[in-house]
């Protein structure tokens, strides 16, 4: 499998496989966001998910995949810091605003910044139509967030704070997307990287909750949610990172931002929210922007 992934990296086949991984990741990430937001405290929800990630990955890391060597530990340390900042910002946004308001802002901010970072730091080249496509995608997502904001209950101070944290989170998404793509390309065994990545970046929140709550009693209300959320996280984050190893970062990450479409569907089906013609048009704009990036 590793040899096959390496052989298709940078090829048209790699691009197609990266697109498929990005779409799977998009659906999984919308589900992941809904699981973290849910009805429970988003800090507890994320800690429960991370606890299960540690449970799932610890035996695999210790006994089935190669251990990190030399500078690989430094790469993992960088991932821990970046993803901790992301998780803190995401939790703060979710505790202040509704899922359908916060999530589109986070996902809409990321693509343009990711495209810029990939061009500057990874040496990737993008044509004009791709920049335009990302602008259409991001603009549609952010306008969708505005419609959701206008329809939300009036609590302006909390909403402003939620949007502020969502914007910061969107920037951290671009940072970790670029960093993770760079990191997984440096490892000879991408699956070993993913296992160790999930393990080391998932210890922080559960440890903090154990110290804060003096035990694991906090985990009981979200036990089943955490077990499912951890499996979803493997698809969401693992899929997009494998996609960026074999394809262009901004192309894969832009397609992943169609998760907003899945988030809207979840809001409609699971949360009973209604979709107006303007929302449907913006959803079409999101899809069109993603298509333009791929056509470029």
Image: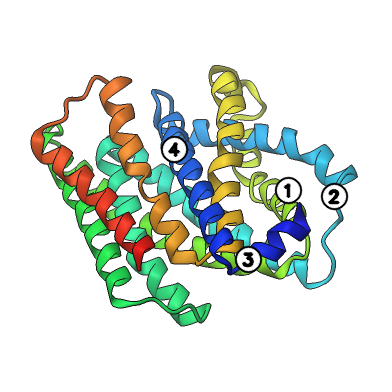
In the picture, the disc for residue 9 is 3
Q: Nearer the viewer, residue 71 or 39?
A: 71
Do the residues under discs 1 and 2 have CB atoms within 8 angstroms? yes
Q: What element carries label 1?
A: helix
Mark nearer the N terminus (1 vs 2): 2
211 over 169 or under it: above or below:
above
Report the residue marked by disc 4. 27
Do the residues under discs 2 and 4 have CB atoms within 8 angstroms? no
Disc 3 crowd rating (10 Å Cα; few below 14, some 14-19, many 20+) is many
Disc 1 crowd rating (10 Å Cα; few below 14, some 14-19, many 20+) is many
Marks 2 and 4, how far apart at CA: 28 Å
* Residue located farthest toward the right when viewing the structure as drawn: 63
Disc 2 crowd rating (10 Å Cα; few below 14, some 14-19, many 20+) is some
Residue at (56% x, 53% y) in the render: 17
Report the residue marked by disc 2. 65
Report the residue marked by disc 1. 195
């Amino acid at each position: 499998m590793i040899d096959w992934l390496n052989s298709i990296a940078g090829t048209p086949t790699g691009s197609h496989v990266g697109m498929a991984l990005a779409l799977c990741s998009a659906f999984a990430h919308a589900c992941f966001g809904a699981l973290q937001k849910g009805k429970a405290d988003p800090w507890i929800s994320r800690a429960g998910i991370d606890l299960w990630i540690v449970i799932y990955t610890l035996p695999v890391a210790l006994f089935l995949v190669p251990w990190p060597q030399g500078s690989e530990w430094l790469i993992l340390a960088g991932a821990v810091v970046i993803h901790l900042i992301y998780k803190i910002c995401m939790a703060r946004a979710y505790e202040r605003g509704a899922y359908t308001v916060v999530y589109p802002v986070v996902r809409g901010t990321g693509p343009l910044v990711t495209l810029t970072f990939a061009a500057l730091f990874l040496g990737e080249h993008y044509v004009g139509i791709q920049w335009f496509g990302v602008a259409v995608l991001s603009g549609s997502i952010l306008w969708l967030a505005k419609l959701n904001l206008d329809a939300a209950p009036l609590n302006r101070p909390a909403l402003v704070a939620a949007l502020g944290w969502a914007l910061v989170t969107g920037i951290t998404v671009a940072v970790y997307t670029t960093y993770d793509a760079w990191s997984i390309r440096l490892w000879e065994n991408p699956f070993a990287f993913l296992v160790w990545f999930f393990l080391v970046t998932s210890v922080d929140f559960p440890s903090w909750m154990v110290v804060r709550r003096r035990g694991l009693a906090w985990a009981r209300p979200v036990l089943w949610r955490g077990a499912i959320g951890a499996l979803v996280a493997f698809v969401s984050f693992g899929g997009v990172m494998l996609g960026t190893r074999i394809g262009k970062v901004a192309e894969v990450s832009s397609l992943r931002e169609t998760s907003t479409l899945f988030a809207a569907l979840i809001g409609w089906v699971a949360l009973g929210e209604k979709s107006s013609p303007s929302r449907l048009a913006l959803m079409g704009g999101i899809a069109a922007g993603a298509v333009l990036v791929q056509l470029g």
